[in-house]
Amino acid sequence: MASNLYSTLAILLLSISISRSARIQAIGVNWGTTSSHPLPPPKVVELLKSNNITKVKLFDADPLVLQSLSGSRIEVTVGIPNSMLRGLNSSEKAAESWVHDNLTRYLSDSAGGVRIHQEFPHEHIMGDGQGSRWIKELYSSGWSKVPSDVQQAVSRSGMSVQKLSLYTPTGQKAKYIAVGDEPFLRSYGEQFYPFVVGAASNIQTAVIKANLENKVKVVVPCSYDAFQSDSGLPSKGHFRSDVNKTMIELLMFLNKHRSPFFVTISPFLSHYQNKNISLDFALMKETARSHNDSHKIYKNNFDLIYDTLVTALLTGGSPQIDIVISQIGWPTDGAANATSSTAEVFMKNLMDHLHTKTGTPLRPKDPPIETYIFSLLDEDQRSIAIGSFERHWGVFTFDGQAKYHVDFGQGSRKLVNAQGVDYFSSKWCVVNNNIDLSNATASALDACSVADCSALSPGGSCFNINWPGNISYAFNSYYQQHDQKADSCDFGGLGLITTVDPSVQNCRFPVELMSSHSVSFPRSYLVQPMVPLAVTILLFLSIVRW
């Protein structure tokens, strides 16, 4: 009896432990590096490990990033930028070179390699104790991951640990090569999506030639606006007419190779762009008014968007394809309702919803197989064509400081900030109030055409600071981005370097990172996206001044 009791206890405890582990492992993060002074990759890897984040999705194959991930046992999805799609579409040799340079040499089953794949072996525990002989099939990452108390219970039950056998099933979980970054985005027009299926096919061929097809899946991250509903309800969901043909071809490719459908789900953008979507509905609050669609009740915007996609997939001939949410998040600055407190509410409700595994009205008990939070860190060089909030999706600030709480498996314990971060000196560039400031607005606009002034946008954390405080913010942003060089705080004599922090309430005047991994962007990349913001700031500065 005791033996049977221990056997039952072992199964129960192991099942609970593994179930919780699998649940947590299903959540990953996007790690973007579109920053003027990105946090050094080794610091980011330590940040990931300190916060139990075991999955990361990249937007490219930066060798410094991949090298830093080596030995971390963090699962990696490697990205291919949109700029490479045309070349990969036209050349199998280019695809083979990419796979060799960015995948094969990093892929390793040893502890020292980058985990660009993950195998989930089945555990068969064979009991040979007193009268108890049973087989229990479970999922885990290996016997060493089983808690010691469970191991002891198994031992007391008379089971032989030596008889534990591991094997890789045909349905192993694979990590991914993400071909393109939302190439179907409406604002891109036909710039990228016509080449995506050909590029993915050539990468797949290269993966097969490298004997990696059982370890790595080729996927294409699709944008939030690749599908839509004319009625705003899931039952009318379909892919955009201009991309529908290519999307059908993509689905055929994914189904052929048993790859999931990667997609961005953005309740924030849905609320931001559609007045019919209330904030409570977007935040997944229980107080939100439900939407009824053919007797299907939608209590939150996440389910509504997800099932709109499900209907589009059904119409496209892929009703059963697995779905991976490649990006989902809530920004914390640069727009109304983009705050840390609001983001925390959304993230908690999202995590609770995903962890219940209830699915959606059209896919009950069938939630997304993986979800990647967007994003790990703020990025001050992201395009703000959609809105200034685009630079503030991070759970952490640009320097790795947590903005709000997210449960990545640590429960109620606070997130761990990046440690040992190197900053420039505690110096800021502000406006010199002792001289004529009649040309200050023009100088601020020049600064913001290159630097990051997104916090000055309507609804932003620095929108309400008084003139000329907003001029100082623009000057300081430019000064920090240019490594605190003295001449970058000149502005025709309008600037003044100070050691007194000019931050006001929630408006933080940052000090930039000392990063050996700085990124240089051509001026054309920066100026065009800044034009809408520059106009907004110009109007705002003029109004506030007078």
Image: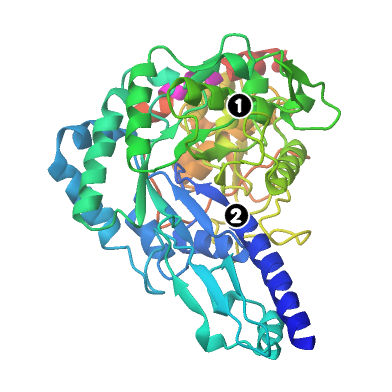
Question: Pointer 2: residues within 10 angstroms few (<14), some, or many (20+)?
Answer: many
- Tell me which label, 2 or 1, sits earlier in the chain: 1
Relative to 219, say whether 74 is above or below: below
**Residue designated by label 1:** 307
- Per the image, label 2 sits on a secondary structure element best described as loop
Q: How many circles with numbers are drawn on the protein?
A: 2
Q: Quadrant of residue 67?
A: bottom left
Q: Quadrant of residue 495?
A: top right
As for residue 532 lying within the magenta part, the answer is yes
Identify which residue, 279 or 33, lies in the foreground: 279
The N terminus appears in which quarter of the rendering? bottom right
Q: Residue at x 39, y 64 (%)?
A: 114
Identify which residue, 288 or 121, lies in the foreground: 121
Q: Quadrant of residue 173?
A: bottom left
Colour approach in the figure: rainbow
Q: Nearer the viewer, mark 2 or mark 1?
A: 1
Q: Residue at x 58, y 66 (%)?
A: 138
Separation (CA) of disc 2 from disc 1 = 34 Å
* Residues drawn in magenta: 528-534
Q: Main secondary structure of the magenta part?
A: helix
Q: Residue at x 18, y 49 (%)?
A: 96
The spot of residue 513 in percent (x, y) is 52, 53
Tell whether 273 sits left or right of 174.
right
Q: Is residue 453 in view? A: no
The spot of residue 158 in percent (x, y) is 66, 90
Q: Amino acid at mark 2?
A: Gly
Tell whether 238 sits left or right of 341.
left
**Residue designated by label 2:** 400
Farthest right residue in view: 287
The spot of residue 262 in percent (x, y) is 46, 37
Farthest top residue in view: 230
As for residue 135 lying within the magenta part, the answer is no
